[in-house]
Image: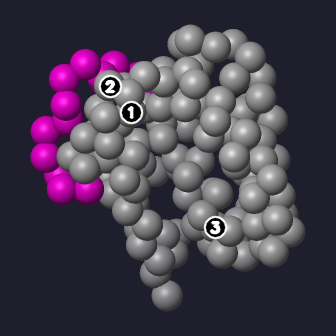
Amino acid sequence: MERVYSCNTCTRRLIEIAYSKSFLFRLFREPLKLIMRLWVKALKIDLSIYEFNSNTCIDCNRFYKNALKDNSAVFRVLNRAINPIFDWWIGSIVSEEELRKAKLHADAEREKNQKPDGWNMTNNLKNWNRI
């Protein structure tokens, strides 16, 4: 059974901005990212059942998080504790305008429209999303 998750906000774009503005945020997020990816592998969760908005969404950490939410009660408990801190911190780093653009970007990916101006589209997405 395929599960479809359409993003309302491009997390990768928000993370890109947050990393450029706060090295400490990177130190907070990277261990969480590593743990989630290892946890998915340990549980042998098949990520191929998740549908992506576009090829640029492949291997986005959001899908690892969604897979763990779907498959692990322990993860759901931990996520309820950690996610508010994560959301508060990234919200304090990213401006309202940047958040608006991340929402526009997610809409464009979902609808297969042209991306909004102002994003660094030169990233190697395969390296960006991987550990």
Q: Secondary structure at mark 3?
A: helix
Residue position marked by numbered label 2 in the rendering:
97
Question: Going by the picture, which residue comes out furthest to the bottom?
Answer: 1
Determine whether 3 is above or below 89 in the image. Answer: below
Q: Determine if the magenta segment contains residue 124.
A: yes
Residue type at mark 2? Glu
Circle 3 residues within 10 Å: few <14, some 14–19, many ≥20: many
Residue type at mark 3? Ala
Residue name at image x 73 percent, y 39 percent: 85
Q: Which residues make up the magenta segment? A: 110-127
Q: Earlier in the sequence, mark 3 or mark 1?
A: 3
Q: Position of residue 37 (x, y in %)?
A: 73, 51
Q: Earlier in the sequence, mark 3 or mark 2?
A: 3
Q: Secondary structure at mark 2?
A: helix
Residue position marked by numbered label 3 in the rendering:
67
Circle 2 residues within 10 Å: few <14, some 14–19, many ≥20: few
Determine whether 36 is above or below 5 in the image. Answer: above
Whole-number angstrom distance, CA of label 3 to CA of label 2: 30 Å
Residue type at mark 1? Leu
Whole-number angstrom distance, CA of label 3 to CA of label 1: 24 Å
Determine whether 10 is above or below 29 in the image. Answer: below
Q: Determine if the magenta segment contains residue 60.
A: no
